[in-house]
Amino acid sequence: MKFVISVLSSSNAPSTRRALRFAQAVLAAGHDIVRVFFYQDGVLTASNNLVVAQDQQDIAKQWQAFIAEHELDAVVCIAAALRRGVLDHSEAQRYQRDTVNLAEGYQLSGLGQLHDALQQADRFISFGGE
Amino acid sequence: MAKSVLLISRHAPWAGSDAGEALDIALAAGAFDLPLSILFMDDGVLQLLEQQLPRMLEQKDLSANLQALPMFGIEQLYVAQQCLNLRGLGDSCLAIAAERLDDQHIQQLLRQYDYVVTL
């Protein structure tokens, strides 16, 4: 089964942790993940400027490691990212900002990438709210 | 055949970016000619009301984007009648034409699409 997973809340939200555990379970069960799409506050998960206290789970870091380990296609909605201050090199240059904070393994792209993934998938599950 | 999406928009138009970001999903589907319909539920029904004055809240007018949906090929808009009723808007005129559905018809609608996306 081919899955698309979308993450809609920030990395502090329990739903973003559940999204990661779900994604891990999908692969562990032998299914495929076509794409993980980060939208709304979910784009904040792709920021490498998050600093989490040592005694707390760093879900953003865990997402990043999971994406790298499985070479997943992780797309961050560019419009949602820009308005929340998550920039890659070319956007920082374009808007003359000092900070590049899109973590490694993620790509900024448009909402078309969500629809493109849905067309290739069998199942879509999104994680938002709390 | 392209897989279809039912987008459920559940937030009030001027309560943060949810309503606008839901609409962007619809417009993107339209731009790629993909089948998508929108169901307005909960506070999302407020997006359809007439005579909104977003400028008084220093907000951008969303209704122009909603009205542009048919031009993007998004022609099927639905609204949950029960959600209008609960807000005292049962008989209200809607600025955007949307088909009113009772709960039973919403159940049927949900089964007609390949994916349901709720924002």
Image (cartoon, grey):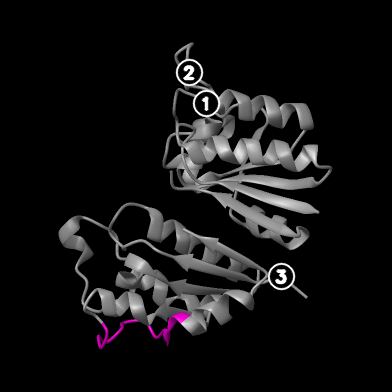
Marks 1/3 same chain: no
Q: Amino acid at mark 2?
A: Gln
Residue at image x 73%, y 27%?
A68
Tell me which secondary structure the magenta stretch mostly adopts. loop
Residue under numbered circle 2: A56
Mark 1–mark 3 contact, CB under 8 Å? no
Residue under numbered circle 1: A101
Q: Where residue B67 sits in the image (x, y, percent)?
A: 40, 77
Assess disc 2: are there few (<14), some (14-19) or many (≥20) residues with their C-alpha within 10 Å of its C-alpha.
few
Residue under numbered circle 3: B3
Left or right: residue B43 compared with residue A114 = left
Q: Nearer the viewer, residue A18 or B28?
A: A18
The span from disc 3 to disc 2 (Cα, nearest Å) is 40 Å
- Asked if residue A1 is positioned above or below residue A55 in the image, the reply reads below
Q: Amino acid at mark 3?
A: Lys
Q: Secondary structure at mark 2?
A: loop
Q: Which residues are magenta?
A: B90-103
Q: Amino acid at mark 1?
A: Asn
